[in-house]
């Protein structure tokens, strides 16, 4: 076997050596002396330059994580230089951001094309690269103060209303400019369902919503992430609105006053509402006024510093229309049956004159036209009077009408039993009338009359108003006095020093 191999190797050995020499010589001629060029494909890492310029101008790259990290280079090189291509310092691929300055403010949120710069010795040439370049999106980080909204959800208990919430109403937001531009609201949702007292949340989380109502809280930085919220919940009360006015020009009367609306609904603490029964408007000055007048009042002026609010909020006006007419007068006859008697001792029996009583009224034409003999009524208050003869003043309730011949007094005989007697005439305008007295009391009644001397002096007031104490009419036609001590009523008014009602 060895002999066979040796014979093959050494057979024509000189020719074989000549062929090897020729091959080496040819290689030297082709690759060493001629040094032909060739193309090489190399993948190179991409580096960034000029990022400090971006920061100085307030920019940052929004899609930095989407930029390719390598580039594939097709490089033409001489054969003798190929080996040097694999040296890391020979070739570099760079994306330079230094050209992006303040002039790019209008490019925020848009794609900006940048090239990949390849740096290599002149003995090499780049035949191609993949990718050729990149697109970056720049943005700016901005900070702004934005308003905070508190959104009550649900409905409070019937008869109550929630007032505007109390809370920190602004917060600083730091976010990319494009994100800030899309912020729709920064809000807190608070449930008020069936609430009948204040709602307090110590740490209510803020939510940031964009224009499509997407929650983007995680995309922004807030100066505070939670705020305290208090939503007042108060009862509602309906209050009448009362108008006041002064006397008009001499010879004129206020025929009617229309308040619109007549009631308003207010919201506030229960302990305040329970002490308020009405809202009384400032007096309307009618001096020199001879025709109808219309005045508007802003109810908010009457709620200042009262801890009360209008239901539903907003500006609320009340209109008062005052109708003025020239003065008129007419004479009426008061029927004895139209006199209601108030007394506190049912064991005593009062007796009144039987004749009609003349009453002269004056006022506007409309006001006095509604008063007739049939509906003219008066009250006679006998409370506290004992048996005997008394001159008692009649009280009339006639809105916007006055009694010209006031005061009108009646001679009243109060006895414990009915009898026959003659009542001496008084000095009032009531005609002399004979009534029956009990024989046991008639002498005493006359004696009392004689002892009295002159009748009581008549009042000089121009208008006799009905007593404020209400009465109830019994089956015997008499009016029983109501209990005393009725509570006083507070009235809201911006000027407590002008409470006289014309």
Image: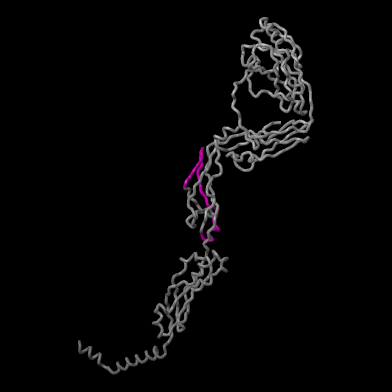
In this image, 483 relative to 437: left or right? left
Number of labels in the image equals 0
Q: In the displayed structure, does residue 150 sit left or right of residue 345?
A: left
Question: Is 277 displayed left or right of 30 in the figure?
Answer: right
- The residue located at (60%, 22%) in the rendering is 484
Between 325 and 24, the residue placed more toward the observer is 325
**Residue 1: % across, % down:** 20, 87
Where's the C terminus, which quadrant? Answer: top right
Determine the image quadrant of residue 453. top right
Determine whether, in the image, residue 339 is placed left or right of residue 172: right
Q: Colour mode? A: one colour
The single residue placed furthest to the bottom in the displayed view is: 14
Residue at point 39% right, 88% down? 31
In x, y percent, where is residue 116? 49, 74
Q: Nearer the viewer, residue 498 or 417?
A: 498
Magenta extent: 175-202
24 is higher (above) or lower (below) than 324:
below
Kindly identify the residue that appears in the image at 73 percent across and 38 percent down. Answer: 294
Q: Is residue 194 magenta?
A: yes
Q: Pinpoint residue 462: horizontal percent, then vertical percent.
A: 74, 25
Q: Nearer the viewer, residue 359 or 261?
A: 359
Whether residue 134 is situated above or below residue 2 in the rendered picture: above
Give yes or no for residue 148 being in the magenta stretch.
no
Residue 447: x %, y % from top left: 70, 8
């Amino acid at each position: 076997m060895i002999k066979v191999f040796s014979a093959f190797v050494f057979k024509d050995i000189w020719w074989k050596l000549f062929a090897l020499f020729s091959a080496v010589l040819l290689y030297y001629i082709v690759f060493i002396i001629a040094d032909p060029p060739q193309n090489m494909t190399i993948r190179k890492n991409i580096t960034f330059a000029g990022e400090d310029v971006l920061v100085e101008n307030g920019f940052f790259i929004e899609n930095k994580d989407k930029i390719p990290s390598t580039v594939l280079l097709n490089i033409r090189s001489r054969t003798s230089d190929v080996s040097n291509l694999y040296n890391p310092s020979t070739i570099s691929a760079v994306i330079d951001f230094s050209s992006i300055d303040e002039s790019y403010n209008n490019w925020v949120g848009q794609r900006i094309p940048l090239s990949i710069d390849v740096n290599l010795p002149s003995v090499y040439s780049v035949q191609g690269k993949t990718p050729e370049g990149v697109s970056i999106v720049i943005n700016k980080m901005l900070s702004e103060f934005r308003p905070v909204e508190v959104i009550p959800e649900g409905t409070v208990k019937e008869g109550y209303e929630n007032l505007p919430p109390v809370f920190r109403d602004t917060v600083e937001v730091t976010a990319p400019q494009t994100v800030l531009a899309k912020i729709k609201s920064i809000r807190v949702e608070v449930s008020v369902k069936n609430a009948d007292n204040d709602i307090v949340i110590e740490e209510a989380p803020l939510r940031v919503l964009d224009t499509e109502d997407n929650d983007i809280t995680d995309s922004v930085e807030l100066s505070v992430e939670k705020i305290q919220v208090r939503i007042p919940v108060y009862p509602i009360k309906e209050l009448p609105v009362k108008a006041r006015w002064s006397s008009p020009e001499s010879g004129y009367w206020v025929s009617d006053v229309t308040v619109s609306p007549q009631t308003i609904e207010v919201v506030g603490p229960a302990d305040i509402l329970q002490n308020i029964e009405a809202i009384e408007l400032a007096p309307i000055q009618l001096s020199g006024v001879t025709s109808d007048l219309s005045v508007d009042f802003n109810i908010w002026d009457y709620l200042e510093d009262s801890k009360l609010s209008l239901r539903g909020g907003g500006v609320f006006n009340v209109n008062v229309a005052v109708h003025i007419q020239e003065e008129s007068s007419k004479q009426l006859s008061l029927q004895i049956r139209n006199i209601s008697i108030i007394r506190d001792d049912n064991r005593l029996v009062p007796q009144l004159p039987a004749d009609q009583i003349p009453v002269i009224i004056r006022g506007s034409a409309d006001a006095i036209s509604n008063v007739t003999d049939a509906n003219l009524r008066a009250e006679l208050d006998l409370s506290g009077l004992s048996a005997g003869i008394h001159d008692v003043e009649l009280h009339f309730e006639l809105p916007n009408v006055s009694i010209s011949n006031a005061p009108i007094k009646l001679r009243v005989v109060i006895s414990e039993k009915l009898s026959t007697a003659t009542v001496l005439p008084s000095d009032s305008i009531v005609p002399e009338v004979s009534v029956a007295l009990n024989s046991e009391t008639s002498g005493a009644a006359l004696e009392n009359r004689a002892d009295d001397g002159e009748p009581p002096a008549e009042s000089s007031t121009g208008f006799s108003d009905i007593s404020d104490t209400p009465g109830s009419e019994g089956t015997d036609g008499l009016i029983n006095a109501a209990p005393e001590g009725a509570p006083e009523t507070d009235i809201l008014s911006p000027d407590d020093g002008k409470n006289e009602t014309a």
